[in-house]
Amino acid sequence: MRFFFDMSPTITDISFLKDYLEEKYFIYNSKQFIEKDPISIPHLFSKKEDLEISGFLTATISWGNRASIIKNARQLMNYMDHAPYEFIMEHTQKELKPVEKFVHRTFNGMDCKFFMHSLRTIYKTHGGLEKAFQVPVSLNDSSVKNNIIHFRKLFLEPKHLARVEKHISDPGNNSSAKRICMFLRWMVRKDKSGVDFGIWKSITPSQLCLPLDIHTGTVGRALGLLSRKQNDWKAVEEITNVLRGFDERDPVKYDYALFGLGVEKAFEKF
């Protein structure tokens, strides 16, 4: 494995790269990160269920321009009168009507209405979002792949249009499931910075997988962390396994380093 840094000789010492990512993790994993990131939306709330629902809906529309994501996620919170859990559990069809005009890229009002309906079912029938991500003992794994597959099956149980299925990624079909992996990072990870919430205990940080997108994928390849060209689940497993070698208890903390380097295009000097 080879790494290239600006004006430096080729580095073959893996510990050097680990130290480099640790340094960037501490830089980007800060409360300054929150303001311009979609995670700012669940940070508006303190109740567990409000955090879960606002985080899940925000993560669902988290592709494209971050400013647009935040703007549209705030609109969703407005539809729910800034009380996500209460709205999900008690809304009437009349109160749901305004949601029909919601649009974020290919996620439209009908998709949104189904998501709200399915969330109600998840809380009424399956004990809430956290429990819906729990898998039977026989399916337990070292990563969250089976958790996501299990959740997707439960979430899509209510009658729905086929189009909504594309908004719940399936790692069993080799999708990178970036947005769900990001949501799980928000719910499971916890450290002193206070960016992630760490309110779920049924999944451990060691099981998390990297939310792989164009930024983290490009930087990962530039650093030699990832050889696979496609940003799919196989690539997620490849890069996450490398990061587990750096920190087996909390591999996804390096998401901050990779994403931050990608957004700032700092990797271009490598």
Image (tube, helix red, strand yellow):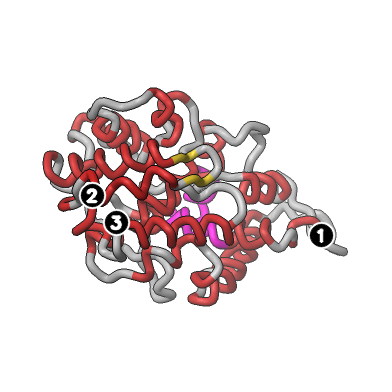
| Pointer 3 or 2: first along the chain | 3
Q: Is residue 96 left or right of residue 34?
A: left
Mark identifier at residue 269 = 1
**In magenta stretch: residue 251:** yes
| Pointer 1 or 2: first along the chain | 2
**Residue designated by label 3:** 52
Mark identifier at residue 130 = 2
**In magenta stretch: residue 175:** no
Above/below status of 217 relative to 44? above
Q: Give the image location of residue 268, x and y in percent.
A: 79, 56
- The magenta span reads 241-256
Q: Residue at x 68, y 51 (%)?
A: 219
Occupied quadrant, residue 78: bottom left
Above/below status of 230 relative to 36? above
Q: Which residue is drawn at 49% across and 31% down?
A: 175
Q: Distance between the residues labelled 3 and 1?
A: 38 Å
| Pointer 3 or 1: first along the chain | 3
Q: Residue at x 55, y 47 (%)?
A: 63
Q: Do the residues labelled 3 and 2 touch (CB within 8 Å)?
A: yes
Q: Give the image location of residue 263, x and y in percent.
A: 67, 59
Amino acid type at image mark 1: Lys
Does the rendering let one see residue 143?
no
Secondary element under disc 1, as helix, strand or loop, is helix
The residue nearer to you, when weighing 234 against 62, is 62
